Amino acid sequence: MDRPATGRPPGPAAARTLRDVVFVDGVRTPFGRAGAKGQFAETRADDLVVKVIRELMRRHPELPPERIDEVAIAAATQTGDQGLTIGRSAALLAGLPRSVPGFAIDRMCAGAMTAVTTVASGIAVGAYDAVIAGGVEHMGHHPMGAGADPNPRFVADRLVDPDALNMGATAENLHDAYPRLTKARADAYAVASQERYAAALAAGKITGDFVPVATRSTENGWSLADHDELPRPGTTAEALDGLRTPFRPHGRVTAGNASGLTDGATGCLLVAADVAEELGLPVRMRMVAFAFAGVAPETMGTGPIPATEKALAKAGLTIDDIGAIEINEAFAVQVLAFTDHFGLADDDPRVNPYGGAIAMGHPLASSGVRLMTQLAREFAEHPEVRYGLTTMCVGLGMGGTVIWENPHFDGVGSLDLTPEQAAAVGDIADAAGDLGAALDPQNAASTTSTTDASTTTPGSQQ
């Protein structure tokens, strides 16, 4: 049969349109402290993934297991109990039908985020209907960079500075590049992260996404991992000021203003919007746009900045349209670089309202879905927020950002104005009143004009 002159295939494929991708649910294990004394010290990484897959399926019995089209699981170190194409092996171990395929993926810290965007693209073009995506990192079994053999040409050919291969050193470089990002600011931000996490935990906003894990250790026998091990409630700036700076003598990056070494796994369920409607699955977020960007490896912490700018441009939005931001706190200085760039205050309530990785830990490839799960919870609590984003820096000089829409948005936004902006609005209102009085003095005498700084405007749907 001759092809049409356009070169497009005949039939339904010629008229295919992109489908909306929705986030149904996300779960995670509690995060454990990496090392011999951590709660997951003798638990396999792939078994952590099995727990999150089973929990997603348990929560959504309306989704037949055979309708899962793919399982995408990220790990930064894909050897040992994180090897053997962990997406496929974990799917089999979790009891999904053998017909369900799976794969492993890696983008270092943004592994789970990349798993999500990869399979979401497949949903959008019709290759998938329903997928599970997530990530795992058992840093107690697989320390960062373990087994890696960086090509010597990276340094010999001056492609990157030696600091680029040490994440803590790149954070010190950020402090150098932006002197206004002081250690005092980083420590204050770290304290706030701990405080926000503690408040969210007390309010029941953390453990609702947990999958408790039964663990066994040679020393202590059986126990239940049902809490994050890394938070340090009661942390003060004075205490952080006395910590050593392991990446540079008299440096600014410490264990207190950086994320800890962590074990944990995350997973989420993504489906096409029409499939969610067909099966009666809840919709917690709709994906709007995503972007990844490269930056200088020596200051990889700036990665979220161009990634967010690219994603916002793709979505036709500005940072002022974003009402909730979940940014991975690899280092406090990296978050502050982001907030400074976009003109946000260090304590902007839109940023990590439940605390972040400085408090709860950062199991590398799994953190992207943890950010998404927390954003989904924030959306449910804040129907006045229409758009939110999840963003993170990535080793070797990258950043990733995903923009999401709140399905609970009620169309009533609020605009927080500075005193100068409020005064300008008042001047405009007064001028309008004067003009009205000149045109219709009788009506103006009986009309009171007021100015409300929280009035909804087209740009205020936050």
Image (spheres, rainbow, N blue to C red):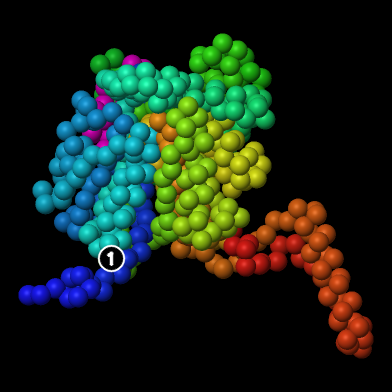
Instruction: Tell me which corner region of the image, top left, top right, bottom left or bottom right, holds residue 209.
Output: top left
Residue that sits furthest to the top in the current view: 249
Q: Image height check: is 160 above or below 115?
A: above
Q: Residue at x 17, y 76 (%)?
A: 4
Residue 201 screen position, x and y as percent: 51, 39
Taking depth in this image into account, of 115 and 30 the one nearest to the observer is 115
Residue 123 screen position, x and y as percent: 28, 59
Q: Residue at x 42, y 56 (%)?
A: 289
Residue 453 screen position, x and y as percent: 75, 62
The answer to if 45 sits in the magenta stretch is: yes
Q: Image height check: is 423 above or below 27?
A: below
Q: Residue at x 50, y 16 (%)?
A: 247
Q: Is residue 303 visible?
A: yes
Q: Which quadrant of the figure contains the C terminus?
A: bottom right
Q: Residues in magenta?
A: 36-50
Taking depth in this image into account, of 341 and 376 the one nearest to the observer is 341
Q: Which quadrant of the figure contains the N terminus?
A: bottom left
Taking depth in this image into account, of 14 and 203 the one nearest to the observer is 14
Q: Image height check: is 403 above or below 104?
A: below
Residue that sits furthest to the left in the current view: 1
Residue underneath mark 1: 275
Instruction: Tell me which corner region of the image, top left, top right, bottom left or bottom right, holds residue 148.
Output: top left
Q: Amino acid at mark 1?
A: Val
Q: Residue at x 22, y 27 (%)?
A: 79
Residue 30 screen position, x and y as percent: 38, 34
Q: Is residue 38 visible?
A: no
SS of the residue at dot 1? helix
Main SS of the magenta part reads: loop
The answer to if 336 sits in the magenta stretch is: no
Taking depth in this image into account, of 52 and 401 the one nearest to the observer is 401
Question: Badge 1: how crowded within 10 Å, few (<14), some, or many (20+)?
Answer: some
